[in-house]
Image (tube, rainbow, N blue to C red):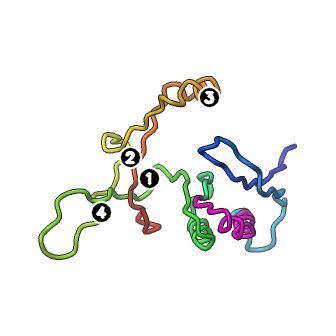
Amino acid sequence: MKGLELSLLAIVSATDKTGFALDSKQTPNTLPDKESRLDFYLQQVEASKDFFVENNVKYLVCDGFYAKEKTWDKAASAGLSVLTKLRCDANMKWLYAGEQKAKGRKRKYGSKINWKATDLLDKMDLAPSYATTEKEYPQLAGATLYSKVVYSVKWNEN
């Protein structure tokens, strides 16, 4: 039905390649004053905080919609790190890997990342799972994935 939306919180095991629904809530069509949809969704994360701690859950993996400061704050209070897609112009810096000077504070960060220059990123090897991936998601058949731990200026973390 048009306008019907559900927020689902699930626990996923990457090693077992399985997932289990933990909590689901229907998004209300009207929210109290000064409460956004993001606030409503993060209340669901807050309510499950004890479960995350008891079961050693480390990451909150979410849609790019959640790439906001409120999400980082709520995840940190639940002991979680956030994995999400950032905007294409996100202010990120390389972790400095060059030679350090003899005196003074050591450099932590290098230059700002140019997202169009992928030569400094680590290309991910998709060979082990590619055959399955190609059958299930044919639109990914020529996709190249890159990875790198970098520094986020906005959230002051790697």
Whether the residues at callouts 4 and 2 have beta carbons within 8 Å, the answer is no
Q: Could you tell which of marks 4 and 1 lies nearer the N-terminus?
A: 1
Q: Position of residue 4 (x, y in %)?
A: 84, 49
The residue sitting at 73% across, 74% down in the picture is 34
Where does residue 101 sit, x and y in percent of width and height? 14, 67
Q: Is residue 60 magenta?
A: no
- Kindly identify the amino acid type of the residue bearing the numbered disc 3: Tyr
According to the image, label 1 marks what residue?
Answer: 89
Residue that badge 4 annotates? 109
Compare residues 27 and 122 and report the one nearer the observer.
122
Residue at the right extreme, as displayed: 1
Crowdedness near tag 2: few (<14), some (14–19) or many (≥20) residues, C-alpha within 10 Å: few
Residue 43 picture location, percent across and down: 73, 68
Identify the image quadrant of the N terminus. top right
Determine which of the numbered discs, if any, sits on residue 137 in the image. 3
Judged by depth in the image, the label closer to the viewer, 2 or 3, is: 3
Q: Nearer the viewer, mark 4 or mark 1?
A: 4
Q: Residue furthest left?
A: 102
Q: Residues within 10 Å of mark 3 (few under 14, many from 20)?
A: few
Marks 4 and 3 sit apart, C-alpha to C-alpha, by 37 Å
Residue type for callout 2: Trp
Please say if the residues under marks 2 and 1 sit with CB atoms less than 8 Å apart.
yes
Instruction: Identify the mark at residue 49; answer none if there is no mark.
Output: none
Q: Mark 1 or 3 closer to N-term?
A: 1
Q: Earlier in the sequence, mark 2 or mark 3?
A: 2
- Sequence-earlier tag: 4 or 2: 4
Left or right: where 102 falls relative to 150: left
Q: Tell me the element at label 4.
A: strand
Residue topped by disc 2: 115
Q: Residue 43 lies in magenta, yes or no? A: yes
